[in-house]
Structure formats: C-alpha cells, structure tokens
Image (spheres, rainbow, N blue to C red):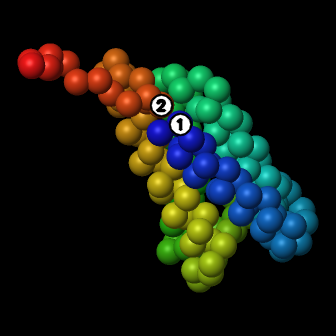
Amino acid sequence: MRVLTALALFIDAGVHIHLAPGYQGASPAGIGQGNLFLIESAAAILAGLYVLVRGSRASYALALVVALSAFAAVVLYRYVDVPAFGPFPAMYDPVWFFEKSLSAVAEGAGALLAAVGLVRVATGGPAGAPRRSSRRRTT
C-alpha cells in the first residue's frame, strides 16, 4: 500500500515537473501556473517519501490531502473557467491530453490508496504489511 501510494504521488509530481515550464510562460507575472505546478510537485514528492518512510496515519493523511487536492484542481479547471484572483492566474484548460490524463489518474488513484491506507492504519492494521487472520487454525 505504501509503495503504490508513493508511486502515484511520484507519477503526479513527474508530470507536473515536466509541464511546469510550458505553463509558466502563459503568466509571467504573479505566482504563475508553472510555479504552482512545481509547488504541487514538491508537496507530492514529500508526501510520497513520508508515506514510504513512515506509513503512519499522519503520512497517509498528508498523502490524501495532496492527491485529492491536486485531483480536485485538475477536474475543476478542466470544467470550470475560474477567473484569476489575487496573484493566482486563470488556469482553465478545457482539454484532456495524455499527460494531464495521466496526472489525473495518478492523483485519483493516490487519493484512493491513501484513504485505504489511512483506514487500515487507523483500525490497527499496518498499511504496508499483509493482515493476519484472527481465526485460529484447527488441525
């Protein structure tokens, strides 16, 4: 569970790092979408490493927040033309292309995996290890 959650976050980060330079040019003033992509990438990498190293409730909760917020943002800005506000640019992008789709799938999968890991750890089972049955074997 830990490895899959981290892998989803690392895929998301890789796509955003790859796309960041092309999106920054569209908004050189303010924060810019490219810089937001780099910030999201850093958050995804840190959350992925945290899950790999610890596998704790806090690590899965962080992974869930990072993945779910990234997934919500890509879906929101795909279907809703949110205007620029403050230093944040308008990021409406009404097309699905391969890298954007890959990122969205990785973010959605990462959110689901992190949620499952969080539930497993919260209920007392280790999220990265197989569960043992509480039934005794009778021979």
Residue 79: give x, y in percent of width and height.
50, 74
The image quarter containing residue 20 is bottom right
Q: Residue furthest front?
A: 139
Q: Residue furthest left?
A: 138
Cα–Cα span, label 1 and label 2: 5 Å
Residue named by callout 1: 2
Q: Is residue 34 left or right of residue 67?
A: right
Q: Is residue 107 above or below residue 44?
A: below
In percent of width and height, residue 87 lies at: 78, 54
Residue 16 is left or right of residue 127, and the answer is right
Q: Secondary structure at mark 1?
A: helix
Left/right placement of residue 32 relative to residue 80 reads right
Q: In the figure, is residue 114 to the left or right of 15? A: left
Q: Nearer the viewer, residue 132 or 90?
A: 132
Residue type for callout 2: Gly
Look at label 1 and name its amino acid. Answer: Arg
**Residue displayed at 47% across by 39% down:** 1
State which quadrant residue 138 falls in: top left
**Residue 38 visible to the viewer:** yes
The reply to whether callout 1 and callout 2 are in contact (CB within 8 Å) is yes
Badge number at residue 128? 2
Q: Position of residue 54 (x, y in %)?
A: 59, 23
Where does residue 53 sit, x and y in percent of width and height?
64, 26
Q: Residues within 10 Å of mark 2 (few under 14, many from 20)?
A: some
Q: Residues within 10 Å of mark 1 (few under 14, many from 20)?
A: many
Residue at 38%, 30% (x, y): give it.
130
Comes first in the chain, label 1 or label 2: 1
Front one among 47 and 2 = 2
Above or below — where is 32 with respect to 119?
Answer: below
Identify the residue shown where x is 74% and y is 58%.
14
Q: Is residue 22 above or below residue 49?
A: below
